[in-house]
Amino acid sequence: MANYTLEEKDSFTVLGLGTELKSDYTDYAGINKEKSDFWESVKEDGRLDTLKAMAANDYVFAVNEAVNNKMMHYAGVMIEASAPAPEEARVIQFPKGEYLVVKGEGRTADELNNKLSGLAFGQFLPEVKDYAYVGGPNATVEIEQKNGLVFGEMWIPVVRK
């Protein structure tokens, strides 16, 4: 079950470890495999746990952002704006404003991310006629795990048309 709302959010900062996605932006299977391999890597080598130790809350962010004409994907956590960042990490600023928020669940974080991305960009954004996504970072946020499921939201900054 997934639904969406439009919510006003204060600006926030995510500290992320990133990878450049090399697959064509229309190659969903390739992109999803790259993301999955990246997440497996940051979990296995302890980098995600290092980030979690710096986090302002328990949320884990999967951030997508275009940087210098590259499609980037980050594993991240919300931090206080003044927190020091490790050299290999990127500080990602999310603006104050309205966000399309899509809620859902999946058996894994990958499934949650893929499901929410598909619903947000394939179904809900086209339905929201008075708003547009004009780029900038967007994120899937893992909020909690219970009963064998991962619950979360996708946050996409939008502007009124």
Image (cartoon, rainbow, N blue to C red):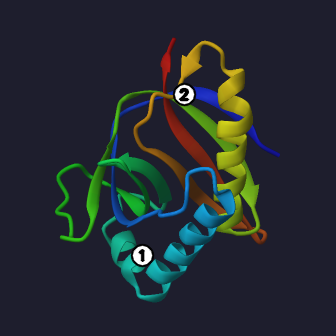
Quote the CA–CA distance across marks 2 and 1: 28 Å
Q: Residue at x 64, y 57 (%)?
A: 27
Sort mark 1 into few (<14), some (14-19) or many (20+) by Cα contacts within 10 Å: many
Q: Residue at x 41, y 78 (%)?
A: 49
Q: Residue beneath label 2, please?
A: 7
Disc number placed over residue 14 in the picture, else none: none
Inspect the image, locate mark 1, and give the three-letter code of the amino acid beneath it: Leu
Q: Residue at x 35, y 33 (%)?
A: 95
Q: Are marks 2 and 1 in contact (CB under 8 Å)?
A: no
Q: Is residue 121 above or below residue 84?
A: above
Identify the secondary structure beneath mark 2.
strand
In the image, 43 versus 80, the foreground residue is: 43
Q: Position of residue 92 (x, y in %)?
A: 31, 50
Inspect the image, locate mark 2, and give the three-letter code of the amino acid beneath it: Glu
In the image, 18 versus 43, the foreground residue is: 18
Earlier-in-chain disc, 2 versus 1 = 2
Describe residue 91's horizontal placement relative to residue 142 as left or right: left
Q: Is residue 55 above or below residue 154?
A: below
Q: Is residue 72 above or below residue 48?
A: above
Q: Position of residue 98 (x, y in %)?
A: 48, 25
| Residue 5 seen | yes
Describe residue 96's horizontal placement relative to residue 28 as left or right: left
Residue sitting farthest toward the front: 24
Q: Position of residue 1 (x, y in %)?
A: 83, 46
Q: Position of residue 107 (x, y in %)?
A: 76, 68
Q: Quadrant of residue 56?
A: bottom left
